[in-house]
């Protein structure tokens, strides 16, 4: 499990409303869930650890997310992320409102990083929210990052595929979320990347041997993602 190990160093409908510092406007008139803390010991401990790490060491990159990031294979993280000064700032089980609460309560209070990575939203769909509401939750976090870190390059990652069967409803929901949030990328400070294809075989199924539960990934899965993440991070840092 990846902990706080790092060195310091298709077109959707038009947005509903204009969005200030974001290229994308609101995706729905429904109000997304308000920022909310998690009420379990692990989430609280991770929140405190991330706050402490972000405030005491100047990390090049903050990687925000849920279990897909927190549980990043440790060996692959140390090989690819640690040399790039990436802080694993993810908490397993987080939904968009939980991450938003963290961003408002200390996770952004340290020295501004050169880049931030955002991968959040799969657990929102797990709560039976519509793709539009899930995408709005992602957008709320993106807006908070832009407001608090206006000079930081942001890599917005599309949601990674879940479930093995390509035509299952969760795959369609993920595709809908990704089509919406992709419109937030402006190529200036916000850069969208969909790496999910790296986890699929030629038939669109999850590649054999990369996931036991069709949601989380083992070392083989992260090994498929790491080189592309390396390139994306290196490009962001060079831009800054």
Image: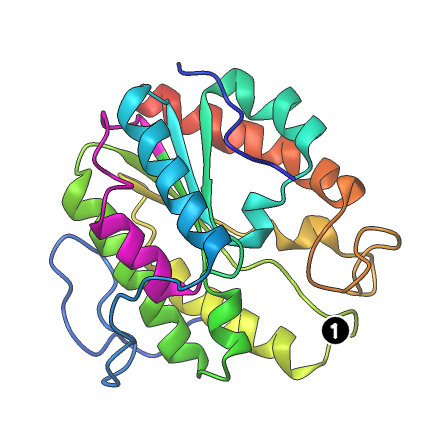
Image vertical order of residue 68 relative to residue 164, above or below: above
Residue 212 visible within the image = yes
138 falls in the magenta region? no
Residue sitting at 45 percent across and 58 percent down?
120
Counting every numbered tag in the picture gives: 1
Q: Is residue 109 above or below residue 161?
A: above
Position of residue 164 measured from the top left corner of the image (x, y, whole percent): 79, 69
Secondary structure at badge 1 equals: loop
Residue farthest to the right, as pictured? 208
Q: Is residue 240 left or right of residue 17?
A: right
Q: Which residue is mark 1?
A: 166
Would residue 101 be counted in the magenta stretch? yes
Placement of 212 over or under 229, stated as above or below: below
Q: Which part of the image, by quadrant, shows the N terminus?
A: top right
Quadrant (top left, top right, bottom left, bottom right) of the C terminus = top left
The image's colour scheme reads rainbow
Closer-to-camera residue (44/119)? 44
Residue range in magenta is 95-115
């Amino acid at each position: 499990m990846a902990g706080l190990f790092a060195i310091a160093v298709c077109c959707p409908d038009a947005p509903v409303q204009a969005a200030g510092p974001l290229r994308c406007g609101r995706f729905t008139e429904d109000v997304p869930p308000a920022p909310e803390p998690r009420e379990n010991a692990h989430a609280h401990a991770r929140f405190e650890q991330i706050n402490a790490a972000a405030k005491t060491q100047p990390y090049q990159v903050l990687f925000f997310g849920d279990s897909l990031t927190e549980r990043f294979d440790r060996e692959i993280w140390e090989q690819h992320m640690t040399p790039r000064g990436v802080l694993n700032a993810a908490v397993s089980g987080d939904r968009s409102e939980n991450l938003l609460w963290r961003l408002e309560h200390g996770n952004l209070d340290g020295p501004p990083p050169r880049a931030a990575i955002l991968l959040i939203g799969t657990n929102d769909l797990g709560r039976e929210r519509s793709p539009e509401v899930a995408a709005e939750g992602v957008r709320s976090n993106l807006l908070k990052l832009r407001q608090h870190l206006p000079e930081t390059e942001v890599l917005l990652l599309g949601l990674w595929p879940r479930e093995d069967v390509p035509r299952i409803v969760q795959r369609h929901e993920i595709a809908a979320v990704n089509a919406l949030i992709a419109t937030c990328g402006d190529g200036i400070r916000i850069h969208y990347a969909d790496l999910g294809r790296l986890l699929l075989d030629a038939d669109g199924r999850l590649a054999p041997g990369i996931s036991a539960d069709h949601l989380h990934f083992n070392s083989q899965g992260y090994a498929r993602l790491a080189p592309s993440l390396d390139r994306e991070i290196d490009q962001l840092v060079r831009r800054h």
